[in-house]
Image (spheres, rainbow, N blue to C red):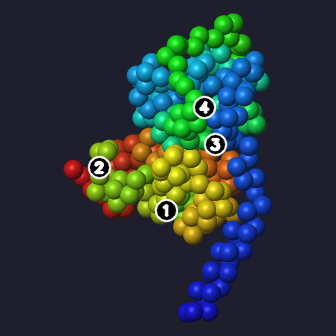
Amino acid sequence: MLRAKKIRLMALAALCAVFTAAPALAGILVTPGWLAAHANDPDLVIVDVQNKPQSYARGHIPGAVRVVRHVDLEDPYRYPTNKYPGREQFVALMKRLGIGNHTTVVAYDDHHDIFASRFFFVMELYGHDTARLKLLDGGIKAWLASGRKLSTAAARPENPPAYTTSGPNLNLVVSWQRVFRDVVQKQDPRVVLHDARPLPEFDGSKVRAIRGGHIPGAIHLTGSDAANNKDQTFKAAQDIRAAFVRAGITPDKTVYTYCHSSDRAAHAYVVLKHLLGYPDVRIYEGAWKEWGSLTALPAAAENYQ
């Protein structure tokens, strides 16, 4: 038994070492200093995705355009509405924000980059060049901590460029049917399912849908394993990677990730794919909001309240 455990630990260490060479941090994180230096670049747009709709008016990074999570980044015509926006909605949003196909976008929020990550993922879903997608590490909190000021003046882009897309890229998302087949029925051993929700939701003690619990076979790991809670910046890539690998979410697998409403899952997607270099990550966009409501589907730690 000890020998087997030693072999597993050695394999784990080797796996971490191999993927340390992956494109860690991959250029998607920028500092307040970088953003301040590039804020007036003609091909750059700063996007504010703060948690509360009224936060933008109270103060935002100068020049930032406003995105409202529950209006702009979900689709009111699909069930559940937490699914990502449709093509026409996305193109209209790009026009309002002044974003073209060749725009460099820096998104930030006030909540560990969770909502900024959702915006990042939506942009990637519709084919925006990921080399032109950035997150402000530490968000608005880091901006303020660096001694920089906020603005209350709303940004209004002039002569917004037209945005063209053939998206969404449906290879980046999976349906409940796919999750059920590949994970619950174990038809694809290459797939691992990641649950990014807080522990009380995972173990069923906190119910936010028709029922609580989690999808059978899911591995629980929260965004706190990727972020420094004090300043909301990301932890070192090797530390994040080690946490995922220890949990069994390894780069050789296809990773399906989900949460309650596809915010934390987008954060996990950005972490796994763009910070750690995992090659195949997809989001179950229906999330627990959908799975928990489809009561014919199985659930572990099932709880009704």
| Residue plotted at (63% across, 25% down) | 46
**Of marks 1 and 4, which one's residue comes earlier in the chain?**
4
> Can residue 152 be seen from the camera position used here?
yes
**Residue behind mark 2:** 207
Q: Residue 98: x and y, percent?
A: 65, 16
Classify 10 Å Cα crowding around label 4: few (below 14), some (14-19), many (20 and above): many
Q: Identify which amino acid the numbered label 3 is placed on.
A: Leu
Classify 10 Å Cα crowding around label 3: few (below 14), some (14-19), many (20 and above): some
Classify 10 Å Cα crowding around label 2: few (below 14), some (14-19), many (20 and above): some
**Of marks 3 and 4, which one's residue comes earlier in the chain?**
4
**Of marks 3 and 1, which one's residue comes earlier in the chain?**
3
Gap between marks 1 and 4 measured at Cα: 29 Å
Nearest the eye: 77 or 96: 96
Gap between marks 4 and 2 measured at Cα: 31 Å
Gap between marks 2 and 3 measured at Cα: 28 Å
**Residue behind mark 4:** 107
**Is residue 140 rendered to the left or right of residue 305?**
right
Q: Identify which amino acid the numbered label 2 is placed on.
A: Val
| Residue plotted at (54% across, 67% down) | 247
- Nearest to viewer (mark 3 / mark 4): 4
**Residue behind mark 1:** 219
**Residue behind mark 3:** 172
- Nearest to viewer (mark 1 / mark 4): 4
Query: SS of the residue at dot 2?
Result: loop
Q: Identify which amino acid the numbered label 4 is placed on.
A: Ala
